[in-house]
Image (spheres, rainbow, N blue to C red):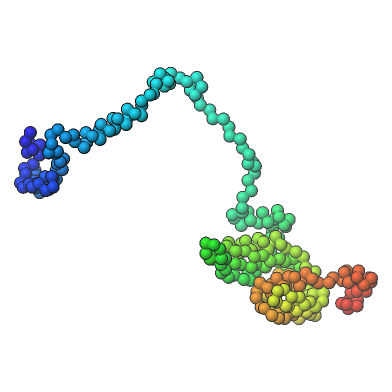
């Protein structure tokens, strides 16, 4: 058959390059010039030599015959009939999966109200008392922990909370975000609240000197109206505890974390009048009169 009868347009120029017929054609309808390429299959010079495609077809037929050789078709199941075990008549109903997890799932608090309710259950404080607590974020800094994967940066926060009536606590938190670190530190501080004794609900029972690592602080009890004259970290702690008259001096390291922790330990190490009276074998009123000038 003539090649021109199969081509829907007129061939203007053609050439053969590496068994490929390349010709320029012009379509009379669209008046566009295009180039078409026809790939010619290389013919064998020997007419008796088989083609490569015929050899591949024979190999594939031989492989298929080897795969199915020796199979007995009588052992195949008859798919036109229902199987008495696998094919169950009627609708398929899956058996109920056994539930082993508890019916009530406790999740982490996401909102402020849920957070307050969870803290109220743990600390046995009312939600209004938790909201009225004084919250002071004293330290915020960037820290990094060295691991086998490298340095992992995060934010550190230290928060002091208290009601100003002798109840206070502090907490530390770390997270990638500052607000989340402060929230974690605040929750830990509320969970670690404790009561600190105060003389006349305004100052210390006696002078205190306490050391924590490289920090040494000295706290002095002062008369009414003296005020709070001390390091700014101790000042915030005294405000949260509810101490109104106190003076202090920090020796050694002035690191904020050490100063705050040393202050809490110092306030917790006070010798109460009941303990002094018991150790000296005296009445409580005599101890008050001798040590504190009151009756």
The residue nearer to you, when weighing 251 against 213, is 213
Q: How many marks?
A: 0
Image location (x, y in percent) of residue 225: 77, 80
Left or right: 198, with 283 as reference point? left
The image quadrant that residue 49 belongs to is top left
When the figure is inspected, residue 198 is found, relative to residue 38, above or below; the finding is below
Image location (x, y in percent) of residue 43: 14, 39
When the figure is inspected, residue 155 is found, relative to residue 80, above or below; the finding is below
Q: Residue at x 82, y 76 (%)?
A: 206
Q: Residue at x 59, y 55 (%)?
A: 111
Left or right: 101, with 94 as reference point? right
Image location (x, y in percent) of residue 62: 30, 30
The residue nearer to you, when weighing 165 against 65, is 65
Q: Residue at x 68, y 63 (%)?
A: 189
Q: Is residue 54 visible?
A: yes
Q: Is residue 154 visible?
A: no
- Quadrant in the picture for the N terminus: top left
Image location (x, y in percent) of residue 211: 74, 75
């Amino acid at each position: 058959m003539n090649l021109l009868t199969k081509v829907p347009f007129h061939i203007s120029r053609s050439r053969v390059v590496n068994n490929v017929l390349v010709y320029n054609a012009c379509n009379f309808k669209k008046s566009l010039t295009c180039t078409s390429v026809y790939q010619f299959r290389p013919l064998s010079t020997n007419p008796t030599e088989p083609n490569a495609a015929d050899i591949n077809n024979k190999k594939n037929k031989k492989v298929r015959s080897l795969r199915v050789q020796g199979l007995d078709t009588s052992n195949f199941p008859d798919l036109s009939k229902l199987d008495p075990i696998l094919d169950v008549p009627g609708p398929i109903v899956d058996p109920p999966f056994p539930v082993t997890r508890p019916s009530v799932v406790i999740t982490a608090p996401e909102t402020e109200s849920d957070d307050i309710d969870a803290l109220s259950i743990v600390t046995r404080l009312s939600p209004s008392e938790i909201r009225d607590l004084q919250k002071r974020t004293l330290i915020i800094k960037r820290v990094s922990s060295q691991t086998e994967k490298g340095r992992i940066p995060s934010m550190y926060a230290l928060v002091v909370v208290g009601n100003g009536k002798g109840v206070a606590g502090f907490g530390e938190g770390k997270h990638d975000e500052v607000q989340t670190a402060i929230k974690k530190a605040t929750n830990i501080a509320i969970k670690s609240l404790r009561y600190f004794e105060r003389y006349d609900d305004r100052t210390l029972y006696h002078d205190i000197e306490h050391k924590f690592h490289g920090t040494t602080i000295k706290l002095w009890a002062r008369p009414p109206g003296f005020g709070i004259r001390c390091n700014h970290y101790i000042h915030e702690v005294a405000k949260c505890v509810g101490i109104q008259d106190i003076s202090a001096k920090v020796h050694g390291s002035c690191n904020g974390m050490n100063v705050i922790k040393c202050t809490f330990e110092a306030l917790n190490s006070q010798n109460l009048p009941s303990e002094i009276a018991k150790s000296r074998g005296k009445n409580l009123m005599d101890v008050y009169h001798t040590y504190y000038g009151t009756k």
